[in-house]
Amino acid sequence: MSFIGLYQHTIDAKNRICLPAKVKATLDQASKLYLTIGVEGNIEVYLPAAFEAYMNKIANLPNNNANARKFVRFVTSNSYSVDIDSSNRILVPQPLVEKAKLSKDIYIIGNINKYEIWNKAQYDEYILDASDSLDDLVKDFDGF
């Protein structure tokens, strides 16, 4: 299953996000998700199997590389298991809310094997910059 789409949404004062129906429909009846901080300051949202695959991938980074160790610590110390409640809400842990600078208005974005949660203003700026340089971005990918 590939996750796609962009959903403008909100996070409430208690750090809860009600999952949009189209997002919930793609989650294979999951009752639990894994949240971690993304390298661009967003929050990454994984189904359990995808999160396990991600953890296995970073576990194989070379332990003799200082940057790899820092990255592993950063990801694992900023990862949380969250339940989907009966109202299809998730509770975003406060440390992730702060690191991702989430305010009331957010985007939930499909990104192939995960969803991402972004501060709306930050994503608007990010995507504007990416849109301006889309031709340059795809030049880096052979055969695209």
Image (tube, grey):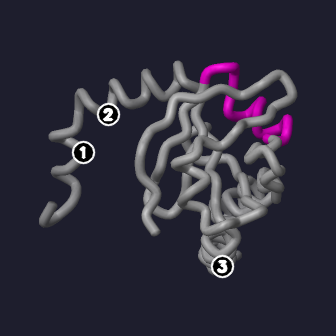
Magenta-highlighted residues: 92-105
Query: What type is the residue that disc 3 sits on?
Result: Asn
Residue drawn at the location 52% of the way across and 48% of the way down = 22
Q: Is residue 104 magenta?
A: yes
Number of residues whose C-alpha sits closer than 10 Å to that of mark 2, classed few (under 14), some (14–19) or many (20 or more)? few
Judging depth in this view, the residue of 61 and 108 nearest the camera is 108
- C-alpha span from label 2 to label 3: 30 Å
Q: Quadrant of residue 127?
A: top left
Classify 76 as above or below 56: above
For the residues bearing labels 2 and 1, Cβ distance under 8 angstroms: yes
Q: For mark 2, what is the residue? A: 130
Q: Which residue is mark 1?
A: 137
Identify the residue at image location x=85%, y=35%.
94
Three-letter code for the amino acid on which mark 2 is drawn: Ala
Front-most of 36 and 33? 33
Is residue 61 in sight in this rendering? no
Residue density around tag 3, few if under 14, some if 14–19, many if 20 or more, within 10 Å: few
Queried whether the magenta region covers residue 55, the answer comes back as no
> Residue shown at 70%/70% (left/top)?
48
